[in-house]
Image (tube, rainbow, N blue to C red):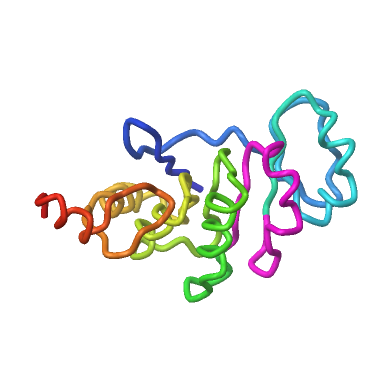
């Protein structure tokens, strides 16, 4: 699946250095790996002992509170959208960024749709797995379509109200 990442220079398609392991799959000696919450809880000590970054994939019903104390040790947290109408991952992303101070890659996986991409970004996501390679250009365009916002989020973008007070909108 194509991966889009947003960085200081904008959004672009990127190579994926992460290997998502199945729960029964052997833990490789090297390489960046991401595991399920169940595996993290079962093998936490071994995963933290690795010299290379470790990531986590949370299903829609798995609240990040389960790993609150470990977020600083994770290089990736992937939040699943099982269907495009399930918005729990939006709340989880804001919790991770704004309450837990998570600084690593926050990736949207599953039913990632173009119409919500910018809102995912405003909630803290900086990477997106998309299903169709031919849709990359449309997804990149979606990240730049709106540049004035009514509601504040942790992304630091000024709201329309703040811009009006400064005379910029």
Q: Is residue 54 magenta?
A: no
Point 68% across, 63% down: residue: 63
Judging depth in this view, the residue of 26 and 35 nearest the camera is 35
Picture quadrant of residue 49: top right
Number of residue marks:
0
Point 68% across, 70% down: residue: 61
Judging depth in this view, the residue of 14 and 145 nearest the camera is 145
Residue that protrudes farthest toward the bottom in the picture: 85
Q: Position of residue 107 (x, y in %)?
A: 54, 49
7 in relation to 164, above or below: above
Point 35% across, 56% down: residue: 118
Point 28% across, 54% down: residue: 142
Q: Is residue 71 left or right of residue 162?
A: right
Q: Position of residue 148 (x, y in %)?
A: 21, 56
Q: Position of residue 46 (x, y in %)?
A: 89, 36
52 in relation to 1, above or below: above
165 in relation to 85, above or below: above
Residue that protrudes farthest toward the front in the picture: 165
**Segment colored magenta:** 58-80
Q: Position of residue 98 (x, y in %)?
A: 53, 52
Q: Is residue 165 left or right of residue 42?
A: left
Q: Is residue 60 magenta?
A: yes
Q: Is residue 28 left or right of residue 158?
A: right
């Amino acid at each position: 699946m194509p991966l889009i990442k947003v960085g200081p220079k904008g959004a672009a398609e990127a190579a994926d250095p992460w290997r998502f392991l199945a729960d029964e799959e052997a833990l490789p000696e090297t390489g960046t790996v991401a595991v399920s919450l169940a595996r993290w809880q079962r093998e936490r000590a071994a995963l933290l002992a690795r010299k290379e970054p470790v990531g986590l994939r949370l299903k829609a019903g798995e609240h990040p509170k389960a790993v609150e104390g470990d977020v600083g040790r994770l290089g990736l947290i992937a939040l699943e959208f099982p269907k495009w109408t399930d918005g729990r991952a939006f709340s989880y992303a804001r919790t991770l960024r704004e309450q837990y101070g998570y600084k690593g890659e926050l990736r949207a996986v599953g039913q990632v749709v173009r119409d919500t991409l910018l809102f995912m970004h405003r909630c803290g996501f900086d990477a997106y797995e998309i299903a169709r390679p031919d849709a990359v250009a449309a997804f990149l365009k979606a990240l730049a379509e709106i540049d004035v916002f009514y509601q504040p989020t942790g992304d630091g973008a000024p709201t329309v109200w703040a811009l009006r007070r400064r005379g910029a909108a």
